[in-house]
Amino acid sequence: HAPVVVAIDGPSGSGKSTVSRAVAARLGLSFLDTGAMYRAMTWWMLANDVDVDDTDAVAIACAKPVIVSGTDADGPTITVDGQDVAVPIRGPEVTAKVSAVAAVPQVRTRLVELQRGCAEVAQRGIVAEGRDMGTVVFPGATAKVFLTASEAARAERRAAELRAKGVDEATIAAMAADLVRRDAADSSRATAPLSQAADAVLVDTSDLTLEQVVDTIVELVERRS
Ligand code: C5P
């Protein structure tokens, strides 16, 4: 039968990335971080002096970069024109601008095509995480999950992640403010806004451990496939 597609959406800090990777590893599926692709596109725009606030310029330029996502759950990779950008795409410059770039319809059309391509070549199936996996990219997914968490829990998780990477407290505070702004932008944009698909299962992760969330999703996928 058709390969398994697990669509996981939610705001930043909902635990999406960690949860999605763990689910993929447990089920032996590929893993796709679509946020990394929007970040890679944004990184390329900034590196090539494209004015990311100029929608027309972004719409034209977005055809150029070659973005490749490695979908191994044990070590996902992301390159732009052959260059490994895993580190710079997490920086504050890209984070500040990614929502603007991701709101441009031509950017989305291009990356959605790449995302579907990744699912097609995944041997056993794929866990894809982002903002519009269940609503737009994989409407026929085997299982759809919408992850949420309280704003406090999300801010605290993001801060802990950054602290673990040695990021200083001033930057952490700035990124917390950015997270609120980014979620508002992602939820209110015209094209493919962050929203729960009608047939997605809502999981609030505020008071659950990683294992509890992963178990819930693995059970759901096993029931549906
Ligand atoms: O998941 P992450 O926080 O890395 O995503 C970065 C940004 O990419 C989001 O804030 C959003 O603007 C955009 N994005 C998107 N659609 C997706 C995944 C991410 O618009 N499927």
Image (cartoon, helix red, strand yellow):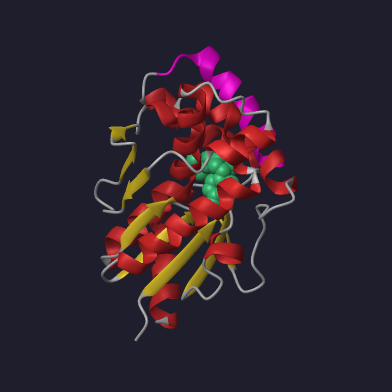
The relative height of residue 165 versus residue 16 in the rendered view (above or below) is: above
- Is 88 or 80 nearer to us in this picture? 80
Prevailing secondary structure class for the magenta stretch in the rendered image? helix
| Residue 112 spot, x, y in % from top left | 51, 57
Task: Check the picture and name the quadrant holding the N terminus.
Answer: bottom left
| Residue 185 spot, x, y in % from top left | 70, 40
Any part of residue 130 in sight: no
Quadrant in which residue 32 is drawn? bottom left
- Is 152 or 142 nearer to us in this picture? 142
- Residue drawn at point x = 60 percent, y = 48 percent: 106
Any part of residue 80 in sight: yes
- Residue drawn at point x = 61 percent, y = 65 percent: 135
Ligand 1's image quarter is: top right
| Residue 213 spot, x, y in % from top left | 45, 59
Q: Which residues are magenta?
A: 167-184
Is residue 24 rendered to the left or right of residue 17?
A: left
Task: Check the picture and name the quadrant holding the C terminus.
Answer: bottom left
Q: Find out whether residue 35 is within the magenta segment.
A: no
